[in-house]
Amino acid sequence: MDDFILRAMLAGIGLALVSGPLGCFVVWRRMAYFGDTMSHSALLGVALAFLLNINLMVGVLGVTVTVSLCLLILQKRGSLSTDALLGLLSHSALALGMVLFAFMSSVRFDLLSLLFGDILAVGNEDVFAIYACAAVILGLMYFLWRPLLASTVNRELAEAEGFNPDLTQLVFMVMMAAIIAIAMKIVGVLLITALLIIPAATARWFARTPEQMAVASSIIGVASVILGLEGSLQFDSASGPSIVVASLCLFLLSLFASRLINRVLGKERGQ
Amino acid sequence: MQLIEMDGVGIKRQGRWLIQNVTLSVKAGEIVTLIGPNGAGKSTTAKTALGVLKADAGKIKRKPNLKVGYVPQKLAVDWTMPLTVGRLMSLTAKPSKTEIDKVLEKTGISHLIDANVQQLSGGEYQRALLARAILRTPDLLVLDEPVQGVDYSGEIGLYNLILQIREELNCGILLISHDLHVVMAQTDTVVCLNGHVCCSGAPEHVAASDAYKQLFGDAASQSLAIYHHHHDHSHKADGTIVPSKGDSGDCCNHG
């Protein structure tokens, strides 16, 4: 295997390990559109990183965290519905990013690779950053699992019984921002949410508890990354869409499999 | 020992008082029931007592390190989250397997330990929520309409269970309920709420009051009316309290 493929595989697997459990929370909390908003605003982060000549991931992290804080503040003021706010933030950040790019005629950049991922762009330092980030996020999730889950089930219950849902939500948003920053090069800003949602949705068919769903989601994510990157090499397609198509195939496969299992079980029970 | 004392508490949202001047307290081993029409601020009062809502007026005193068990009015677990009854028990605490088995047996749902919470019937679900709340051995149990979606015989079973829990844990219970007959029979203190405390005290005292009759109708109070008293004030349209002539008491009249 070539070096760059190995790097992409390693990076993708690290990413999928984290996106599994995090994606479960995105599904449970119905935050798919929120994830989209944050990832679209990553483009503005890239533009600012070029403009200020800072690290790409730092720029993306800064902008996505700012956008999610803006959302929290605007939500509290309660003048617009959440989906309208998300639309406003998502597209404004995307548009701002594009306009900023237009001003920087001196910088050469490949828009398609930003939008859909480019495994050739994954360097050694990226692999290192992804695993460092993944370790921190997984550690945080391990320690915050109970409060995170409790406030997902019912925010008021969690608060009444001694947790701090505001803090938990803030940490969750920062984790989302971090995963977007590290996922950008592999799946691209337009498709990051798919990597969060599809493996989690697939895992739902087989899980009996939230923990099982989180672990299954990670495994399915890793499988999607491996299959997707193989496919990307085979068909010379962009890495992001290939990974998402692979995860879609797994989702459909599991849909039929679970139907079949249910039918067989139903027959055994004489229904 | 008072577990919680609310004194003149108010919650204001968008320039409107959801509740105003609410005073109540719960002692260990005492059942305090909040009654009142829809929109009277019963859940708001309960959430304020729990500290989920911050009071905009008044004072709240809680016993230090008060351990709370809460059954919210609405707890819809999204179907995307796989959650069994057994797993629900350790949502906010870390009980042992034997503790879980014991509490499920007490609430009569041992056979449902591996069932998905989304597939439970109304009565089974309320029992599961109650089991989860008492598993924490709380000092204060806050139950927001714990018998919703439960049929009549199930209701009686649940209320008996609540009484039994009170005996065993000696915890204070703040209960929100619409079942006036049960409230009047099994509660130590009734707080009749309609944005503010209309009337509070022992069940027979509240049932006899004019405020109660106005809110729930004469029929509701007739069987329980033991004595009658007069009201010492009325309300202006904006809710301000105006003293009126008559003897003093802790009830008010809506005029």
Image: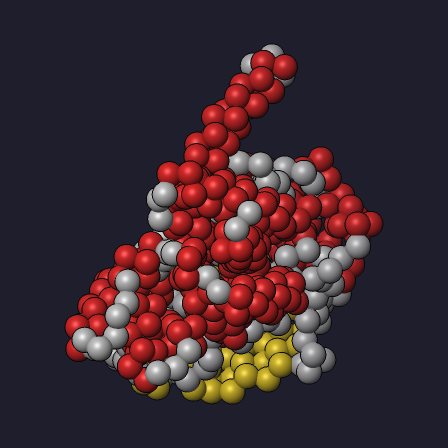
In the image, farthest residue toward the right: B98
In the image shown, does B15 or B212 lie closer to the viewer?
Answer: B15
**In this image, A127 relative to A111: left or right?**
right
State the colouring used for the structure image.
Answer: secondary structure
On the picture, is A69 further left or further right than B125? left
Q: Position of residue A236 (x, y in %)?
A: 36, 43
Front residue of this view, candidates B242 and B7? B7
Which residue is found at the position 60% from the left and 55% from the top?
B185
Q: Position of residue A267 (x, y in %)?
A: 58, 14
* B135 w.r.t. B67: above or below: above
Q: Tell me the quarter of the image containing the C terminus of chain B.
A: bottom left
The answer to whether A232 appears left or right of A125 in the picture is left
Question: Against B164, is A165 above or below?
Answer: below
A133 relative to B231 in the view: left or right: right
Where in the figure is residue B119, as x and y percent of width and height? 54, 36
Which quarter shows the N terminus of chain B? bottom right
Q: Quadrant of residue B117?
A: top right
